[in-house]
Image: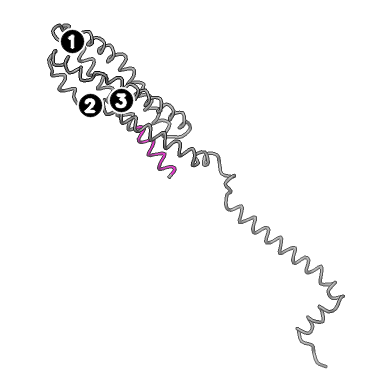
Amino acid sequence: MAIPSSSTRRRQARSDPVSRQQRAPVISRQRAKAREFTANRAEAEGASQPRKRDLPLAASSYEQPHFTAMRVLRFIGLILAVLTFAPAFGHLAEMPNKMALGGQAWYAAQFLYRDWGAFLGPIEAGTLVVSAWLLWRARGRQPAFTLTAIAVACYIGMQICFWLFNAPVNAAVASWTASALPPDWAEYRARWEWSHSVRAVLAFVALVCLLRAALGEAEGNA
């Protein structure tokens, strides 16, 4: 008696209704296990890669719109900081020569700065305002917050120096005449020159702090 081949047995099993009914539960369990395995594998792969909504707020709080706004503010702040430092450094650089001038020569030199306040005053005010705005936007982030706070303090110090020392001297010099200088004119000169020198140092420190804060933020968000 010939033994049927395996292919013959499979054809007979598929054509036999009873055999199909016996095999159906087994096939169903195999398919269910296959689907379960596929689902578990997909879930495991998804869990290994954090989703964007699962990222902590600290990582997503500096996304592109916020970063772009900060870059624009930093750029404006740096431009104003440079414009504030430039004339202050000019006063510091010319201080040795001006301290060696006589009374009438120094009095005449003061008129070279006529109307500077109309141009530099708004620039210094704008620098302080933008720096304070940057300080508010940088809260909670170090070292940008500390560096910007130092810059704001320096700009406040510049204003204090000007209104306590330079402005009174300017008002006094405006009432003088070259032929009748007061006996203590040298004290006015020293007060004016040294105040501007301190302002130059403060402007330099503020510029360095703002530049360092901007570079730090650019490196951290490149």
N-term mark: 1 or 2: 2
| Residue 102 picture quarter | top left
- Residue type indicated by callout 3: Leu
Q: Nearer the viewer, residue 109 or 138?
A: 109
Return the mark for residue 202. Answer: 3
Q: Residue at x 67, y 61 (%)?
A: 38
Return the mark for residue 32. Answer: none
SS at mark 2 in the image = helix
Q: Is residue 109 above or below residue 22?
A: above
Q: Is residue 67 above or below residue 33?
A: above
Q: Position of residue 47 (x, y in %)?
A: 61, 52
Which callout, 3 or 1, points to the residue nearer the camera? Answer: 1
Q: CA distance from mark 1 to mark 2?
A: 22 Å
Return the mark for residue 90. Answer: 2
Return the mark for residue 185. Answer: 1
Q: Position of residue 171 (x, y in %)?
A: 26, 10
Region in magenta? 209-221
